[in-house]
Image (tube, grey):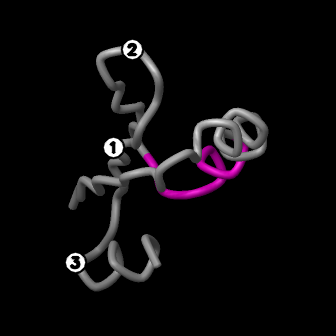
Amino acid sequence: MLYALICTDKPGHLEVRKANRDAHIAYLKSTPVTHAGPFLNEAGETIGSVVVIEAGDRAGAEDWAA
């Protein structure tokens, strides 16, 4: 079953996100993530993400998210 996770960045976290982007994407590719993408603010800056994962049940999705 697919589960969508809504992730919100901490205020002022854009530079940390940019500095870790490549490692973050590499990690996601090694997990049950099927789709992922950013949420943007009005200025086009990333402020969060949606991540879709394949998990056997909601508990499995919550474990992955933790």
Q: CA distance from mark 2 to mark 3?
A: 34 Å
Amino acid bearing label 2: Ala
Which mark identifies residue 2?
none
Amino acid bearing label 1: Val
Which mark identifies residue 58?
3
Determine contact: label 3, label 1, CB under 8 Å. no
Report which residue position mark 2 lands on: 43
- Quadrant containing the N terminus is bottom left
Question: Where is 16 relative to 2, above or below?
Answer: above
Residue 5 drawn at (x, y percent) = 29, 57
Would you say 31 lies left or right of 27 here? left
Report which residue position mark 1 lands on: 50
Q: Earlier in the sequence, mark 2 or mark 3?
A: 2
Q: Mark 2 packing: few (<14 Cα in 10 Å), some, or many (20+)?
A: few
Question: Marks 2 and 1: which is nearer the front?
Answer: 2
Determine contact: label 2, label 1, CB under 8 Å. no
Query: Magenta residues, as a range?
Result: 26-33
Q: Earlier in the sequence, mark 2 or mark 1?
A: 2
Q: Earlier in the sequence, mark 3 or mark 1?
A: 1
Say which of 57 and 36 sits in front.
36
Question: Where is 47 relative to 63, above or below?
Answer: above
Would you say 46 lies left or right of 41 here? right
Residue 52 drawn at (x, y percent) = 33, 48
Q: Does dot 1 land on a helix, a strand or a loop?
A: strand
Amino acid bearing label 3: Arg
Residue at 46% of width from left, 73% of height from top? 64
Question: Marks 3 and 1: which is nearer the front?
Answer: 1
Determine contact: label 2, label 3, CB under 8 Å. no
